[in-house]
Amino acid sequence: MEGLKFNLLNIITLLGSLQGFLICLLFVSSKRFHRTSTRFLVLLVFSISMTNLTNALNEIELQSIYPIIGFCSNSWSLLIPFSLYYFIQFLLNPTYKFRKVEYVIAVVSFTQLAYQLVEIGWYLLASDHIIQYESMLYITSRSIEMVGLIYCLVVIILVFRQLRTYQPLLSAEPPHIQEKSILWLKNTFIPIGVLWVLWAIPLILQVFVPGFQGDYFGPLQLGMALIIYWLGYSVYIYRDLWETKAESEAKLIRKQTELSSKTEEHYQKLLKIMQEEKLYQSAELNMTMLAEKTGLSNGYLSQIINQKEGKNFFDFINHYRVEEVKQKLNDAKFDHYSILGIALEAGFKSKSTFNAVFKKFTGQTPSNFRKQLQND
């Protein structure tokens, strides 16, 4: 087509978007990829790919031939951080459950897409009329993008904090998956933080500095294309993160779940083992080890913990550890022990993890908890 402006960046971006769509198709069509975390990964990759595709089409000026493309550019800036956050939530904690307020966040995130669809419909039905409101639509679009920018920053901060706090959750997985998970998460989120900067600075200048005409789509598009290429590479190199359990194990879990009459018996056996053998004192304890001790499968044991305790494996084990620390801090025999020493004996691996988990369960830091006991 005459008048179109193709360059190397546009080609890389378009190919990256194509790969992103192929990744989504691979996940959706394969029976091996049905984790909830993977569904949010599909939404994340699709949102990034659509954002890059529409921006690239604008860059090559295809909107001069098909003006409707100009109304599709900013449909995804709220869905990207939304899908990113819940992808991490369900990757770290497969039993995670939505809270009521989170359904509101989901509705708000999809509202942007709904708004864009209304805008496109308006254009198709009354293209001459919509031009009169071009300035208003531009301001609305930029306002939504600014909200998306802030939303994304909040998500990045929450995710980085969560990765530091909940890294031990991966101990429920086999060691080779633990290492892959940690490495992949770090290699993915550092570039995402850089991308946020590439998005934030020019956008803020464009909104608040009159006459600023800087092109911020170029570096951002390239960065997003590289993220898509990285995710595509990860599908093969880190496939253990996405694959669901084998069919035979899934059938075994369903069979055991049907034995509801024995669930209470298994639960009481679990509690007895935890109280008498104090397995939680081992920092290396994981789901597989506990399942072997109880004679149950990983999946069935996880269901029992979730149904009976309302906790995931990580919180279930750490509850025992925190209770032991609280008991010893309240015992005069341990006054000469350091808090960290008590925590390590209870099964915590590090000071940072202990502090975060203790505050999560008690609402206080360990030092404040001890001071309160001493004052009482």
Image (cartoon, rainbow, N blue to C red):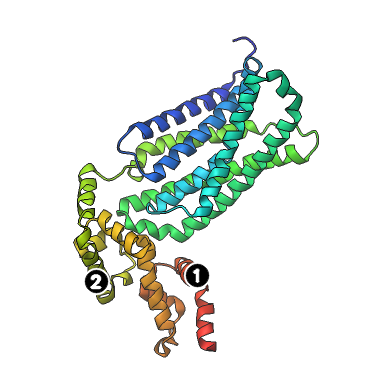
Give above or below for 339 relative to 76: below
Q: Residue 251 location, x and y as percent?
A: 21, 46
Q: Residue 213 location, x and y as percent?
A: 75, 31
Toward which corner of the image does residue 307 lie, by quadrant? Answer: bottom left
Toward which corner of the image does residue 122 lie, by quadrant? Answer: top right
Amino acid type at image mark 1: Lys
Residue 315 appears left or right of 227 = left
Give above or below for 243 relative to 280: above
Q: Quadrant of the N terminus?
A: top right
Q: Which residue is mark 2?
A: 273
Residue 300 appears left or right of 74 = left
Residue 179 appears left or right of 119 = left
The mark that comes first in sequence, 1 or 2, is 2
Q: Secondary structure at mark 1?
A: helix
Tag of residue 359: 1
Q: Residue at x 66, y 16 (%)?
A: 64
Give above or below for 87 relative to 326: above
Q: Secondary structure at mark 2?
A: helix
Q: Residue at x 40, y 42 (%)?
A: 38
Amino acid type at image mark 2: Ile
Q: Is residue 74 visible?
A: no
